[in-house]
Amino acid sequence: GQQLNQSPQSMFIQEGEDVSMNCTSSSIFNTWLWYKQDPGEGPVLLIALYKAGELTSNGRLTAQFGITRKDSFLNISASIPSDVGIYFCAGPVIQGAQKLVFGQGTRLTINP
Amino acid sequence: ETGVTQSPTHLIKTRGQQVTLRCSSQSGHNTVSWYQQALGQGPQFIFQYYREEENGRGNFPPRFSGLQFPNYSSELNVNALELDDSALYLCASSRGQGEFPEAFFGQGTRLTVV
């Protein structure tokens, strides 16, 4: 089945630094979604990307839909303590239902 | 606009028991999906309900079953619980099929099987 690979698996940064993470797939996706999950909570949708090459921002977050449609990138500028959490990429796959396939997540830790 | 709500938030069950988890979808959303998230992993698709019928299932055994009601709320039932069923169970609602892939998640139900 389709799998999404996220890197890095974890990041330890200083407050104020910029963050970059990516997500790759062996298959083409028509939509890329980025979620953030805090401990004990459900994932929250951050950004949705619908078109190859698209660059979309949400505050300090910027995500890009790769030209090959097999990858996506998420950048966070000037990180703050509330950015701590696990970031997941996800893409829709139609197998009967339209389900989401998730990467394994990138865990972000910020040192104050 | 109310978001996705799940109940209960935490649950402890004994191996072999049965459990029912509940989910109210976001207003305006007619599709509900259930996901299982093991510790340290991404969510895994269990099944999806649309118009009160299951319209897709992931790699989960038949002891995982569900319902969707006319108001689009949903239940996940798990029979004959096993220790490996311990996980965060997430409900997600979305606006429909194909055109709107974005799913919005509830806070989850943490199930512990002992």
Image (spheres, rainbow, N blue to C red):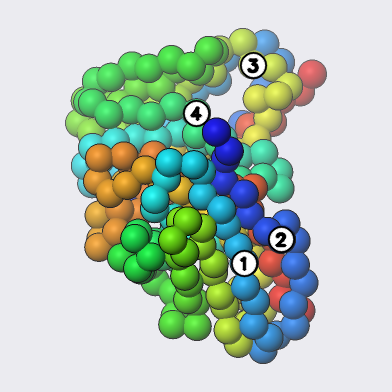
Disc 2 and disc 3 in contact, CB within 8 angstroms: no
In 3D space, how far apart are the residues under numbered discs 3 and 1 (Cα atoms)? 36 Å
The residue indicated by pointer 2 is B8
Q: Who is closer to the viewer here, A47 or B102? A: B102
Q: Residue furthest front?
A: B70
Q: Is residue A78 depicted above or below B100 in this figure?
A: above
CA gap, disc 2 and disc 3: 34 Å
Label 3 crowd (10 A; few <14 / some 14-19 / many >=20): some
The residue mark sitting in front, 4 or 2, is 2
Residue to which mark 3 is pinned: A79
Q: Can residue A39 be seen in this view?
A: yes
- Residue A22, image x, y percentages: 42, 31
Position in image of residue B27 (x %, y %): 49, 42
Mark 3 or mark 4, which has the lower sequence index? Answer: 4
Mark 1 falls on what kind of element?
A: strand
User: What is the three-letter code of the residue carrying label 3?
Assistant: Ser
Residue that appears at 68% across and 30% down: A84
